[in-house]
Image (tube, grey):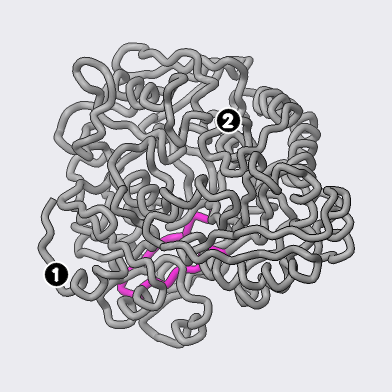
Amino acid sequence: MKKEQDPLRGDIRADLASTRRQFMGGVGALVLGVSLLPLGIRAAQAAPKQGGSVRFAINDGAQTDSYDPATWQSSFTQVVFGGTLCNALTELDANGVAVPDLAESFAASADLKVWTFKLRPNLKFHDGAPVTANDVIESYRHHMGPKSSSAAKALVDAIVDVKGDGDGAVVFTLSGGNADFPYLVSDCHLVVMPAKAGGGLDWERGVATGPYIIEDSQPGIAVKMKRNPHYHKPGQPYFDAIEFVNIIDVAARTNALLTGEIDYMVDADIKTLTMLEQNADIEISKVSGLRHFSFSMNTTVAPFDNPDVRRALKYAVDREDIVKKAFLGNAKVANDNPIAPQIAFAVNPEPVHSYNIEKAKEYLAKAGLTSVAVNLSVAETAFPNAIDAALLFKEHAAKAGIEINVVREADDGYWDNVWQHKPFVGVDWLGKPTCDSLFTTAYAGGAPWNDTAWKNQRFDELLVLGRAEPDKAKRQEIYAEMQQILHDDGGAIVIAYALFIDAISKKIAHGPIGNMLQCDNFRMAERWWLA
């Protein structure tokens, strides 16, 4: 990898359904109440055009980043590699609907156990090689099997067979029905890369199908990319070249945007938002998505292995105070339920875990304690203003006899060395588009991203039943019970549902911004253009 400096890098380097037809035609009904906050009429109305180059600043890259899709756990890898280097069989459009991407169509058997995806004709990888059904098969097998440590393992565990139907179609057979399967295969880890001649996935070269091709990649610093001339979407992408830079420090990102060194910054500093809003050259994008901020307790480690201690901590945090002071109102108070209100089948479990010192003391007493001391590991990269939120939590909990020692961890390597390694940590969850995909990824017993190590037999049984149930009323009952179990017993203290707040140079134009995942559902490099 080249290590030449340019003016920018010299400044930032150190910071561095009821019927199949209805189901196929209305997959978006699984996501309710989709909404966008005002994003700027000028940008939304500009006509797309090709040409030019831009720089995007993301904030959580690491020196351990690689092209292996099984390892992508940060926003940087998911946006740059999952959403820009690669494509999956389906994608989420701006309204959160699962639509064909590398597949041109998909259909299910009546019992939702067998799904067939027909590939678009003449698909090509970045090196010009054709995309075949075997490439899709090996891309999925990369995450499958008992020895897999992939972040997507839990999502593919239900796949009992994947095979080609000629070179142009792929057939998945599942252990049980799954009405949400088109959403599942849109996951950024389940992208398609070339198969090796002798079997396995050729991910090391960074060759895929996405709108941009790798020119230079320096893990933890920057990734330079150029337009893919073989891209399967007519007219896209629009930029000739792009660069993603890793700037962890929010002040450094802000300065880089103000001086024109970058054209976009993720997670604008809410403390300086008013100043940015007054700048005529900058647009502030506020998007209501699935993102939520949590403090996750490892339920296999004392004292978090005691459910009454967990409940005490849930009552010992004043979420309204954190939303007001740490997030300056740019979030909505949550209730220990990771399912965002706009997701189908979302509920608000009772009792609401509002700040209640007496309740916190009561649950400590049930655990046989009058006081308890715990370490809470956070960093600015855990989620925006995580350190401020943790310090407020410390103040709140002290009144209940709970001593929280806030441990400020290093930003670099936080997701590799702290998350899922320390017993009590701050976590930025970007969310998933369905109850099933989020529960399967983060809360099912044994799931690779189950950072609370929580396991509940009833919850896991309902998870299997819910994904296979075609009746919406019955699915509502199932998912409501699951949310209640997680709220009452789980190890996640869900603080708030957060907005995606980004700052964009007005040299960039765009259409409606996707409100499910960060960075226009990870697709801003493909969908945006120069004004």
SS of the residue under disc 2: loop
Q: Quadrant of residue 232?
A: top left
Query: Mark 2: few, some, or many residues within 10 Å (few <14, many ≥20)?
Result: some
Q: Quadrant of residue 210?
A: top left
Q: Residue at x 60, y 53 (%)?
A: 424
Q: Position of residue 288 (x, y in %)?
A: 58, 61
Q: Residue at x 60, y 59 (%)?
A: 375
Q: Nearer the viewer, mark 2 or mark 1?
A: 2
- Viewport quadrant of the C terminus: bottom left
**Horizontal placement of 220 versus 26: left or right?**
left
- Front residue of this view, candidates 216 and 312: 312
Name the amino acid, label 2.
Gly
Residue indicated by mark 1: 6
Mark 2 and mark 1 in contact? Answer it, CB < 8 Å.
Answer: no
Q: Is residue 67 magenta?
A: no
Residue indicated by mark 2: 446
Q: Residue at x 50, y 50 (%)?
A: 419
SS of the residue under disc 1: loop
**Horizontal placement of 174 versus 13: left or right?**
right
- Image height of 477 relative to 265, above or below: above
Q: Residue at x 51, y 85 (%)?
A: 274
The magenta segment: 499-515
- Front residue of this view, candidates 460 and 304: 304
- Front residue of this view, candidates 502 and 444: 444
- Image height of 288 relative to 158, above or below: below
* Mark closest to the chain's N terminus, 2 or 1: 1
